[in-house]
Image: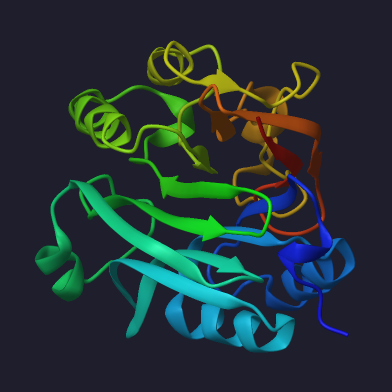
Amino acid sequence: MKRSFSDYTRLMKLVSINIERDKHWPKVEKFLKKEAPEVVCLQEVHELSLRYFAKKLEMNYVFGQMGQLAGKKSGLGILCLLPLNDIRRLYYHHDKEVASRYILKTEKAPSFPRLVLAARIKSRNAHYLVATTHFTWSALGKVTKTQRKDIENFLKVLSSMNEFVLCGDFNAPRGGEIFKKIAAQYKDNIPKKYRTSIDANFHRAAERVRAGNLMVDGLFTTSQYECQNVRLVDGVSDHMAIVAEVVKR
């Protein structure tokens, strides 16, 4: 029998992964089937891949386009057992029109469109607003002028959403300038024991990853939400997967 949010009280199991397009498809599918989350947030996902996962996992989905890569629409995705309502595609670098025609030569380009993709989930026992993003890229977490400009627009977008759960790839290491701006306003829920969220087994810059503090994937909440049993899982993609249980106060 298919699970639904009505099987739970105020607890939501959430997974967030930068899946690096189609490079780790079998591992991602196997991982999601094993974890069986109620909500999944994906970064660097093709829309076709998102549809595939939605069908295989019997979940609903929404997509937020950041551009086209190798002829495929690429961007952010949210999967959920329940219908996704109040869909928000809030761009903080360029806009929807630019994203629809932007040709990505690489996901690492600092100039292509960026957005927050958010959706409201209405269960029998609680309502959740879940959001995800893939923030402006920089080499090995070094702050850039583009990041400094985008973080101000990004925070303005977040302020318009009130209470939410936010996860994704922030391309800004914990403890650094950009991360601190986000953590000053929202709770950082990744346990301090983790020094990196990059999986050196799959990342192209493995040696530099092993040597650096690259906790660049995040899970932030406003005051109405609490995260429990948060963990990072390797062996899924070039970024580790975030797994958490979210409670609505």
> Which residue is rendered at x = 20% and y = 32% of the image?
153
Task: Say how many tags the image has.
Answer: 0
In front: 139, or 19?
19
Q: Could you tell whether 181 is left or right of 153 in the image?
A: right
Question: At which x and y percent is residue 43?
Answer: 50, 58
* Rendering quarter of residue 145: top left
Q: Specify the quadrant that holds the C terminus.
A: top right
Residue found at x 75% / y 16%: 192
User: Which one is nearer the viewer's eye here, 59 or 142?
Assistant: 59
Q: Is residue 228 above or below residue 129?
A: above
Left-right relation of 213 to 180: right
Q: Position of residue 241 (x, y in %)?
A: 71, 49
Viewed as shown, does residue 99 lie left or right of 216? left
Residue 7 in the image: above or below residue 220: below
In the displayed structure, 62 sits above or below 188; it is: below
In this rendered view, identify the residue nearer to me: 248 or 157: 248
Q: Is residue 189 above or below residue 154?
A: above
Q: Residue furthest front?
A: 124
- Identify the residue shown where x is 14% and y is 57%: 95
Which residue sits at x=22%, y=29%? 156
Q: Is residue 28 left or right of residue 132?
A: right
